[in-house]
Amino acid sequence: MKLYSSPTQLTSCTKTNQLLQAVSTWQAHKLRSKQSILYSQAQTQATTSRATQRDYFATDRRPVVLFDGVCNICNGGVDSLLKFDKEGKHRMAALQSTPGKQLLQQSGRAPDDISSIVLVEEGRHYVKSDAILRIGRSLNPAFFVLANAALAVPKVIRDTVYDQVANNRYNLLGKRDTCRLADDAFRERFIEE
């Protein structure tokens, strides 16, 4: 079997291989440079983002309840929490507020996601029925028992019911034009801008 018919073809093939190798090396270098630039930009953005975001647990370890600040159902839930959480175990922030958006991001959620209540603890977060039941378990003994009983219901069913209410919350009880402001009596319970 004859691969090359003449020395000229062999030289041409070698030059082609060298050219392909040079192009490949150049492309790899260019790709590495581009990756390095993108990595550097991502690091800068992450550092800037961390620098501009507050550590909401640096001086206060209480969990934060993120709620839809214009939803009347959600605000009713906040009123109930303020009434039954007499020890002040929880802090609150509207999902639409700057702290709410930052806590959503820190929890790995989109900053404009107002689809669910979110309970943010240091290093963890809970959404939908899990958030509500976790809050309930931290309140008085009656709520603790009720929340534990509700945990027996499969999560898929609990979250389906939650989604039905959440998706229709404005139709059910309406909404406000502006986000709820902290009541002076409970100002220290709300994280504000």
Image: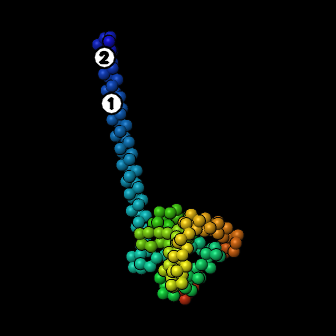
Residue at the spot x=53%, y=71% of the render? 152
Q: Nearer the viewer, residue 49 or 68?
A: 68
Instruction: Find disc 2 in the rendering and name its residue.
Output: 10
The N terminus - image quarter: top left
Amino acid at dot 2:
Leu
18 relative to 178 in the view: left or right = left
Name the mark on residue 49: none
Label 2 element class: helix
Amino acid at dot 1:
Gln
Instruction: Find disc 1 in the rendering and name its residue.
Output: 21
Residue at the spot x=41%, y=75% of the render? 57
Q: In the figure, 35 relative to 160: above or below? A: above
Q: Is residue 139 visible?
A: yes
Residue 71, horizontal then vertical, whole percent: 63, 73
Q: Residues within 10 Å of mark 2 (few under 14, many from 20)?
A: few
Residue 108, horizontal then vertical, whole percent: 47, 63
